[in-house]
Amino acid sequence: MNLDLRGKRALVCGASQGLGAACARQLASQGASVVVLARTADKLKDVCGNLSTDQGQRHGFLAVDANDAVALVEAVTTEKEQGGAFQVWVNNTGGPAPGPAHLAEPAAYAKAFSQHLISAQSLLQVLLPGMREAGYGRILNVLSTSVKQPIANLGVSNTMRAAVANWAKTLAGELAADGITVNNVLPGMTRTARLDSLIQQIAQSSGRSVEQVTKGMLGNIPAGRFAEPEEFANTVGFLASPAAAFINGTSIAVDGGSTGCM
């Protein structure tokens, strides 16, 4: 199986911690030169400094707010001009605030649409020419299992994740002939700082203990445990590789079997 990414450049968004950082480590372990992107420079330096260079890779970082489409495009365009085109893009952005769909202000939907879809489309147009020239592209959207099954109290997020998934499915059909695949990877409950924060929030709002909330979450996962970030990153690494050339337009859940639909 050919998982070799030597000679490829990868852009990993939301890579200062959690799933993004794990994806950056995995792609580097497969030989890619990785540029990690997020808002916090100090965290990015730490992530970048711990990426494998065993195969002569040169890594870098971009400290920019991915929700600012203008700044994002400017930063990535400059990096592309100075360091070369990217063949792998991990499109990873934090989700909108929780809450019921019917209570969300229209402005919240507009803001989320801009942050998730407009920013992604803007960045796509920067990255796409290099992928086409190389005849190799892997676009990997980190979304949510809500693409398959809406999650209670995440009304705006459910809506936006579904919009991005349909954007990706459309792109998959348009770009396949250029050697470019577009897939979505859907994390379930994964052991990250974000999950710890979510458990704390639920415990405080419900009056239950952290242990009770955790037990309730685990009860909904057939595997009986939370995923490790590296398990999610393994899926991303495979889909980014030459071995996954004929996997296109899919949404793959990495959730231990917790999503209750096909």
Image (tube, rainbow, N blue to C red):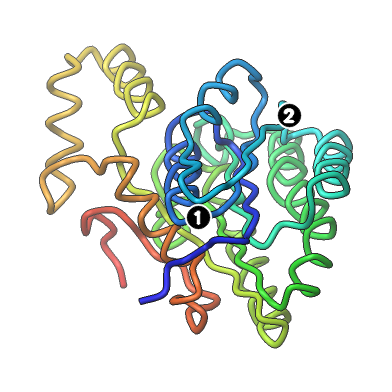
The answer to whether 71 appears left or right of 183 in the picture is right
The Cα–Cα distance between marks 1 and 2, rounded to whole angstroms, is 27 Å
**Pick the front one: 28 or 234:** 28
Secondary structure state at the residue bearing disc 1 = loop
For the residue pair 84 and 107, the one nearer the viewer reads as: 84
Location of residue 254 by image quarter: bottom left
Quarter holding the C terminus is bottom left
Which of disc 2 and disc 1 is earlier in sequence?
1
Residue 215 rendering spot, x and y as whole percentages: 12, 31
Neighbour tally class for label 1: few under 14, some 14-19, many 20 plus, Cα within 10 Å: many
Q: Position of residue 115 (x, y in %)?
A: 72, 40
The amino acid sitting under disc 1 is Gly
What residue is rendered at 80% in x and 33% in y? Answer: 68
Task: Give the x, y percent position of residue 186.
Answer: 42, 55
Q: Mark 1 or 2, which is nearer the eye? A: 1
Q: Residue at x 60, y 74 (%)?
A: 181
Quadrant in which the N terminus appears: bottom left
What is the secondary structure assignment of the residue under circle 2?
A: loop
Res. 145 mark: none
Q: Residue at x 74, y 37 (%)?
A: 111
User: Relative to 71, is 162 on the left or the right?
Assistant: left
Rendered location of residue 98, percent (x, y): 50, 31
Q: Is residue 205 above or below residue 247?
A: above
- Residue carrying label 1: 31
Q: Are marks 1 and 2 in contact (CB under 8 Å)?
A: no
In the picture, measured across the screen, residue 213 lies left or right of residue 132, that is left
User: Circle 2 sits on which residue?
Assistant: 65
Q: Between residue 42 and residue 190, name the one nearer to us.
A: 42
